[in-house]
Image (cartoon, rainbow, N blue to C red):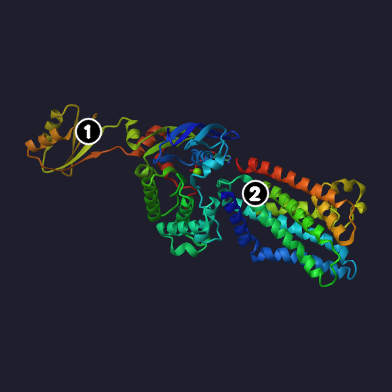
């Protein structure tokens, strides 16, 4: 019961004080929006459906990683984070509460490009039963990646720099805009080490049937990434935060 | 069994030994003071006791709970005030308290009731709706202490609660601490104010360079060094001859006349007052006042640690 109350209130606080703050909302909306519009302008007409999966993945990736890096490093630098470490709740519960907000934020971000695209194309043939879990899993894995960065970084600035260091290469390596088979041969194995690749593949399948892997395989890989990253993060937290 | 038992606690950071094999007990309902200069190892000790840092060696047991093995169980009965006021800047006072209560699993009605009580108790009622970042330093400190008390902890840790705080707020904080003790809360307090430790602590440990140099009640610490006992008498008219007679009559004493109709009588051991008063009376010398001139705790600290007390009094980072 203590865990549940604490979990809910940490989540509520983060949403109220970080996620719903105007600069963060605008970052969450404007960034995916401007990309969507840019792509729409560049290639009007039929290719929107082809672009949308990449835009969705990107919105989730950016939303989650930037938020988490900020909320955790910010609270660490003003030391309010110690309160969470010292609360009588397990480290899992605390970490889950911290990442839940980012996951929800990422999922909502995913629908910003969908919303705007819906004015231009029909989306009723999309297999939403696949898109939703894929978006969820992209959100979970990128949040955990963000967590890993947040654990390592000492400053908010550092966290942002770190996350960009990871995010931009990922955009190009995980098949969002450039199909993996068109990447240089030596980069192709790297693509399959990135969770985003699997999530985007499922979404591409759901939108235009252009998946390379079977959705089952992709979800399996995403789950494995999620569990692995969660365990690594907890270990890291133990090592870095409890000195 | 002591309420808190710290045994052979040690903490090293690379080459630096911050805490060097310290052991002590704290009894239930006691205010235990950790007195030492900057860098003595006070915060390092507290952090190990509350489970925020891992001891290099040693154990901490609080209310029968091994903090190393069951930190979460132990943290449930602890209230913690860090050396910095670390609440959430954008939240107001009331929200801060309610949030901290939620971390301890308190339900909504209970959280709000307790938050209101504490705001009132700490005279922060009007500030309850202002964001924490708009608080003065003293107010921040008080709210941070209130937040630590939200779940009515059995033991309260205070890391330099009054450092950098004005006289009035410090006084209120000390009053609060004493009141808590009266209600049965055990208090562990670090400070570098000797007077503060002397005034409110039941027992004090002097810590320097990671080691406990001496510990005990103020009275016990005073006995650690042999200082003369001295009694100061404010009298009516008397003269050198009287002083000489007095000294002769009480073996081992030394009597010194002061310019302002007073005498100081020094002895190695405790002095029984009645015969002295009788002697005064017999010689027709009126006594208006008699008080013991005690060595101060500061004298004891300086003697035992070899640290100049001026170092202790220096505030961190200059006059902040
Ligand atoms: N995380 C750390 N890494 C390296 N050294 C540390 C760390 N924390 C503390 N120290 C060192 O350990 C020693 C004790 O520090 P500590 O903070 O416990 O002292 P303190 O008594 O609380 O001092 P103050 O009155 O300044 O708060 C100091 O020499 C300090 O530099
Ligand atoms: Mg300290």
Measured as percent of width and height from the top left, residue B137 is found at 47, 56
Measured as percent of width and height from the top left, residue A131 is found at 81, 59
Label 1: which secondary element? strand
Q: Is residue B153 left or right of residue B167?
A: right
Residue under pointer 2: A95
Chain of the residue displaying label 1: B
Residue under pointer 1: B266
Q: Is residue A207 above or below residue B62?
A: below
Are discs 1 and 2 less than 8 Å apart at CB?
no
Residue visible at 15% across and 29% down in the picture: B250
Chain of the residue displaying label 2: A
User: Can you tell which quarter of the image residue A45 is in?
Assistant: bottom right
Residue visible at 70% across and 47% down in the picture: A148
Mark 1 closeness class: few <14, some 14–19, many ≥20 residues within 10 Å:
many
Q: Is residue A61 above or below residue A33?
A: above
Can residue A173 be seen here? yes
- Nearest-to-viewer mark from 1 and 2: 2
């Amino acid at each position: 019961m203590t865990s549940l109350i604490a979990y809910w209130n940490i989540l509520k606080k983060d949403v109220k004080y970080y996620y719903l703050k105007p600069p963060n909302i605008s970052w969450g909306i404007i960034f995916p929006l401007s990309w969507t519009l840019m792509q729409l302008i560049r290639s009007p007409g039929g290719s929107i459906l082809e672009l949308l999966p990449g835009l969705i993945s990107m919105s989730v990736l950016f939303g989650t990683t930037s938020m988490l890096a900020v909320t955790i490093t910010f609270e660490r630098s003003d030391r309010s984070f110690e309160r969470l470490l010292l609360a009588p709740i397990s480290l899992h519960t605390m970490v889950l509460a911290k990442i839940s907000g980012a996951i929800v934020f990422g999922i909502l971000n995913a629908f910003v490009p969908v919303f705007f695209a819906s004015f231009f194309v029909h989306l009723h043939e999309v297999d939403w039963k696949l898109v939703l879990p894929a978006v969820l899993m992209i959100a979970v894995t990128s949040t955990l990646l963000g967590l890993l960065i947040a654990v390592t970084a000492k400053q908010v600035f550092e966290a942002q720099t770190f996350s960009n260091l990871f995010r931009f290469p990922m955009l190009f390596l995980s098949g969002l805009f450039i199909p993996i088979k068109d990447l240089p041969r030596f980069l192709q194995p790297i693509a399959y080490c990135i969770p985003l690749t699997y999530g985007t593949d499922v979404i591409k399948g759901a939108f235009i049937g252009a998946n390379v892997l079977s959705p089952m395989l992709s979800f399996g890989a995403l789950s494995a990434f999620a569990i692995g990253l969660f365990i690594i993060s907890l270990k890291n937290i133990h090592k870095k935060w409890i000195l | 069994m002591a309420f808190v038992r710290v045994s052979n606690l040690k903490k090293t950071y690379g080459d630096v030994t911050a805490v060097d094999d310290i052991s002590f007990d704290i009894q239930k309902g006691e205010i235990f003071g950790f007195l030492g200069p900057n860098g003595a190892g006070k915060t390092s000790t507290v952090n190990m006791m509350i489970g925020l840092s891992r001891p290099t060696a040693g154990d901490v047991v609080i209310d029968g709970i091994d903090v190393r093995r069951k930190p979460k169980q132990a943290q449930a009965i602890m209230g913690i005030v860090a050396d910095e006021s670390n609440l959430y800047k954008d939240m107001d006072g009331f929200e801060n308290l309610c949030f901290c209560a939620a971390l301890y699993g308190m339900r909504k009605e209970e959280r709000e009731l307790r938050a209101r009580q504490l705001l009132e108790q700490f005279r922060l009622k009007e500030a309850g709706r202002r964001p924490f970042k708009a608080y003065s330093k003293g107010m921040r400190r008080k709210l941070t202490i209130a937040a630590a008390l939200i779940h009515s902890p059995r033991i309260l840790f205070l890391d330099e609660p009054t450092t950098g705080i004005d006289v009035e707020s410090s006084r209120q904080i000390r009053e609060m601490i004493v009141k808590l003790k009266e209600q049965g809360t055990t208090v562990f307090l670090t400070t570098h104010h000797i007077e503060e430790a002397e005034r409110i602590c039941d027992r004090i440990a002097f810590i320097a360079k990671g080691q406990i140099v001496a510990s005990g009640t103020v009275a016990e610490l005073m006995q650690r060094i042999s200082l003369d006992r001295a009694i100061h008498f404010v009298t009516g008219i008397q003269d050198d001859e009287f002083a000489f007679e007095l000294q002769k009559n009480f073996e081992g004493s030394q009597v010194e006349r002061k310019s302002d109709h007073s005498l100081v009588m020094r002895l190695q051991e405790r002095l029984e007052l009645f015969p002295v008063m009788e002697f005064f009376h017999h010689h027709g010398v009126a006594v208006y006042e008699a008080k013991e001139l005690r060595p101060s705790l500061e004298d004891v600290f300086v003697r035992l640690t070899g640290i100049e007390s001026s170092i202790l009094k220096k505030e961190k980072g200059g006059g902040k």
